[in-house]
Image (spheres, grey):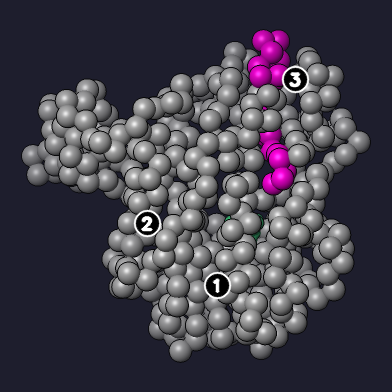
Amino acid sequence: MRIKIEKLDNFGRGICYVNNKICFVENALPNEEVEIEIIKENSKYIEANTKKIYVESPIRTEEDCIYSNLCGGCNLNHICYNEENKFKKEKLKDLIKKYAHINPDIIEKIEYHDRNHYRNKIILHGNKESLGLYKKNSNEIIPIQECLLVNPKINEIIKILQKEENEIEEALIKTSNDNSKIMVSIKGKVVNQKELENSCNVLKINNDFITKEQEIETTIGNIKYIESIHSFFQVNNTLTKELYDEVLNSIKDKHYKKALDLYCGTGTIGIYISHYVDRILGVDSNESNIKDANHNKVLNNIKNIEFIQSKVEDRINEFKDIDLIIVDPPRAGLDEKTRKYLKQISPKTIIYVSCDPVTLSRDLNELQEAYDIKKIKPFNMFPRTYHCESITILERR
Ligand SMILES: C[S@@+](CC[C@H](N)C(=O)[O-])C[C@H]1O[C@@H](n2cnc3c(N)ncnc32)[C@H](O)[C@@H]1O
């Protein structure tokens, strides 16, 4: 069926209508005329693939990844980078207008850096025959020799792991934010262990560390950070400093007395801003993160920060006399209890670092009852994918 695409949905899929029913088309761009193949239909919507492009959009770019449309990693390989950045800014505008009734003109310029090789982390899945990434919406493994998103050092490790006799169930590979160090954790059997050991700083196979080093040290700006293999770290090596600088610049002249860094990971943001706030408390539910956070505090000789390992929602009712709260939740955003207590604690400023504009919009809609939205700035931390990071500054009315 030949059809014209009208616009993009939030996942970067083309939207058209078949017999008045909405149809989401993979790999199709606005104003393109394409042949579609329907792969799923129910009473509400249709999903389709692009079989042939009759009229091509000027914003389409050559798909330079050999695994494009095979692995489930990237969905915007076919849009030129400028347009990808525009798409993310527009998506954020649409969502905050639709779900939080915020004037979309508040959205500032989107920050972005490299489209390729920005990621410092990949997880490969394997079985006896192959090692690679999952095919879109399936558990089928697409064997890969390299990934365009990741640091070239990670690609060197992938090649080593692809030795035929290896039987790897899962491989986690990470580089440090300054690209100088590499960590590998393997579940399974590796026959070329020595070669692998010589190519990385930290190697863990099943439950055992093979290398003497068990963590890596890295830097963001002037701050040193320890990172363990299973701890959280921002994945974009080229833009994390800008993200943290945005938080820093928005608070450094305000002299806050007591701050919370909620969903603090390894304490990275709290430590980054610690010279500008009297006291900070970081909260994260992950044991490895909090262990690294305490290590990072000592490493940087920071005396005014404490960390607790807990779910935010289990402790949020205990915090009082706070004038700054930074939240950086996972994609699910803030839970109902946390939203309620944020309003009750009533800090002067809330800084919301978000990786999902949908849950951000839901949460801002509620927080606006007591807060003015002063600024929303998008960051393209995940080029070639539909995901969009942003920072929102809220001031108590
Ligand atoms: C997007 S990361 C942010 C980490 C950190 N701010 C950074 O920049 O590296 C989200 C963090 O939330 C933590 N987390 C997830 N659910 C949580 C919860 N219910 N309570 C506390 N922490 C949680 C995860 O362990 C993860 O470290």
Q: Is residue 60 visible?
A: yes
Quarter of the view holding residue 143: top right
Question: What is the number of the mark on residue 351?
Answer: 1
Question: In this orientation, which residue lies closer to the viewer: 358 or 103?
Answer: 103
Establish whether ligand 1 lies closer than 8 Å to the Cβ of label 3.
Answer: no
Q: Is residue 313 visible?
A: no
User: Dot 3 corresponds to which residue?
Assistant: 189
Q: Quadrant of ligand 1?
A: bottom right
- Which amino acid, by three-letter code, is at mark 3? Lys
The percent position of residue 17, horizontal first and vertical second, equals 14, 42
In the displayed structure, would residue 248 be above or below residue 287?
Answer: below
- Give the Cα separation between the discs numbered 1 and 3: 45 Å
The percent position of residue 391, horizontal first and vertical second, equals 51, 65
Q: Residue furthest left?
A: 19
Going 50% across and 74% down the picture, which residue do you hit? 393
Q: Earlier in the sequence, mark 1 or mark 3?
A: 3
In the displayed structure, would residue 265 be above or below residue 261?
Answer: above
Task: Mark 2 and mark 3 in contact? Answer it, CB < 8 Å.
Answer: no
The percent position of residue 203, horizontal first and vertical second, equals 80, 32
Give SS at disc 1.
strand
Task: Assess disc 2: are there few (<14), some (14-19) or many (≥20) residues with their C-alpha within 10 Å of its C-alpha.
Answer: many
- Which amino acid, by three-letter code, is at mark 2? Lys
Task: Mark 1 and mark 3 in contact? Answer it, CB < 8 Å.
Answer: no
User: Dot 2 corresponds to which residue?
Assistant: 89
**Image quadrant containing the N terminus:** top left
In the displayed structure, would residue 159 be above or below residue 253?
Answer: above
